[in-house]
Image (cartoon, rainbow, N blue to C red):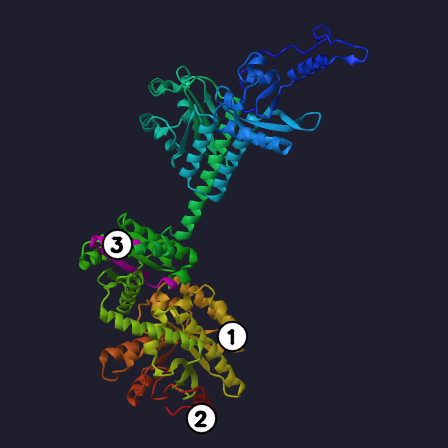
Amino acid sequence: MTNTPVKRLPPRRPATAATAPVVEGNASGPTVAARQHLLETMLDQFPDYVFAKDRQGRILYGNRVTIEDAGFDHADELIGKTDIELYPGEISTMIHALEQDLMERGISSLDSEEPSISHHGGARWLTVSRAPLRASDGEVIGLVGIARDITTRKRAERQLIGQAALLEMVAKGGSLDTLFQALFGFFKEYHPHVIPSVLFMAPDGQHLTVGPEAGLHPDYVRAIDGIEIGPAVGSCGTAAYTGEPVFVADTLTDPLWEPFRFAPLTYGFRACWSMPMRSHHGEVLGTFALYSPTAGLPDRKQIDLITFAANLAAIAIMRKKAEEKIRHMALHDPLTGLANRQYFDERIGDIIEAAAAGGTMVACAFLDIDNFKMINDSLGHKAGDQLLRTIASRAKARVHASDLVVRLGGDEFIILLSDLAMDPAAAAARLEAIRVSMSAPVTLDGRTLQVTCSMGMACYPLHGRTADELLANADVAMYRAKDNGRNNLQLFTQEIDTRTLSRLSRREELREALATNQLFLEYQPQICLESGEIKAAEALVRWRHPEHGIVPPSDFIPLAEEAGLIGELGEWVLIEACRQNRAWQAAGLKPITIGVNVSAPQFAAADWVLRVAEVLGETGLDARYLELELTESLIMQDVARAIDTMCALEDLGVGLAIDDFGTGYSSLAALKRFPVDRLKIDRSFIADIPGDRDGEAIASAIVSLAHALEIDVIAEGVETQEQLAFLRGIGCQQIQGYLVGRPMAADALAARLATAPAGRSPV
């Protein structure tokens, strides 16, 4: 059979004792006619289609539902006809060929699922079993069959397959537009008379914005875009407000639709059934609705489908949000919220390409916070993070929407200005304004600081045509700004490139020197003027370069500071000096104090005191034979913190000296609070005495101050007998300089300690 179910005639009443047909017969049983009548009566009670056909496909028999389904009232109207005559078309032709093949081969076919049509032309599905009809001699003379309408089941299966396909789309992470179009197509197939609609919750959580649409009138869509949710705002606005389904049976009479009464009259829908789309946390993400042209409520199947669609859409939206969040996290710095290096790498090519096409300029600035490591180490990482966020915020506030601010990492930032006229000076003025804005006071951990920045700038196409060239040249210019004393902006030039690349090369060589033991210490003796004994020695670091020989500290100490190696360098000096002093003592030499210079990053480190204690423990040196030399400027950066650290070192037993005293800004009030053992008069005050009245006055004042505070005093850079005589005359207790000993190797100092009587020096 090849028909779909149609509205059937009232079924015949089943046979009962009163209505069952009389079966005539004799003692041997019913007659053939009676048996045939009984069989036909029984088959007429079947809800399935039962039929028989001859070898040409002409219908020999059909039970009652088969007759009715063909659109006939009596069997005589059906008998003798073929499917092709009843239902012209491809399906009937296909069925006829199939049945001819079965009869030709004399085989059966069971439960074959086949498309079919009814006499009204409607599509349907049948499951059909067929078997050959044989004569008494076995010859196939036709076929018999039974068919059941499975259209409802097949529709349900297709619906499940469609739902599974939608779920797979969500799982694979396709675009929301693609998903919603597929969802709308799903509803069009199974509920062609309704129009689906999606509204998204706006970021403020108070309004709905239009999503993909599937057939609502554009004027109506514009009217509801951005609508505020509330307790009586149509179906969707109310559903979004309450978080519950709102099914309005008649938009012309329901009070929820009072503000929108024009819509059903103008745009031709009478019912609107809205379901909130909710996240697994219960957050309303929007609404999914069906608009119906006829008044009424949805049936159970429609409610299930609306619920499925809303839940599916919510999952897709949450997944998309999660993907966007992951994408944002991958392309942005978590601390400042700025774009990161990966985002920069993805965008810079397009920005340069657009500049090339438009004949415009791009300015790339490399920004570095001056002395950030010291701030981070002294005030802690929390304050450092706060400073980074402040710098990021100030930079972001002073650029245009088309510009880009990037945090590379640490205290390094990129500012990219695009779509500029070919005027480097104008771009530099904008960047200088940004740089200057960074120096506004900032409060960190209760302390107000003024932080400066160094900036280097390179322009496309003037200073580079690729992203790598542009960034490298901006970086070179930034290091030039550092070399020029920090707190300035430098525009890239070829001269800067040559000089800076050489300096960068030296930095890498210094890094290698630390790793390959190219550094060594020399020791300069410090002499007591009263006894002539060597009381101490200052450890001075040297670099033996494999190609350039001995590199003076004045060349590589600034390199170490710029490269962030000064802490590592200072640590190495401390360990080596303590180890050597302990070695001298182990060799039987008279103990002396070893002086070690301390860098600002070392002193500012939160664990500095602990690290000194660890080094003393590791080397076995008694703390009283170590003196740490601190500069005035280092101490005065944060006096309160410096005093705390100095007191902790004093408790450890370590001696403290203020190096280069007189060149800094320490006040007498602060000096009284410093737990120091010695003041070192800077060599600049000694160089021109006697004869330099200012130098003599300063040296005399420092010695008097030290005596008043009961602090020892030592003069550096003593090279002549006249200087010695002057210093002895004003009561200076100790001296250091070429007159009594140049810096020397450890073995040379050891020999001097061993050979001089009682370690005395000829002074």
Q: Is residue 381 above or below residue 513?
A: above
Q: Tell me which segment is drawn in magenta.
A: 350-373
Q: Is residue 275 left or right of residue 494?
A: right
Q: Is residue 608 above or below residue 168?
A: below
- Percent from the top left, x then y, of residue 299? 51, 21
Q: Does the rendering let one see residue 54?
A: yes
Q: Does the rendering let one see residue 334?
A: no
SS under mark 3 = strand
- Percent from the top left, x then y, of residue 423? 17, 57
Decide which of tag 3 and tag 2 comes sooner along the chain. 3
If the image is split into quadrants, where does the N terminus sit?
top right
In depth, the one of 362 and 679 nearer the eye is 362
Decide which of tag 1 and tag 2 comes sooner along the chain. 1
In depth, the one of 96 and 533 nearer the eye is 96
Image quadrant assignment for residue 216: top left
Instruction: State the count of labels.
Output: 3
SS under mark 2 = loop
**To which residue does mark 1 refer?**
616
Q: Amino acid at mark 3?
A: Leu
Q: Amino acid at mark 1?
A: Leu
Q: Is residue 102 left or right of residue 422?
A: right
**To which residue does mark 3 refer?**
417
- Percent from the top left, x then y, of residue 103? 61, 30
Does the stretch in magenta take in 578? Answer: no
Q: Tell me the crowding category of disc 3: few under 14, some 14 to 19, or many 20 or more residues within 10 angstroms, Cα based.
A: many
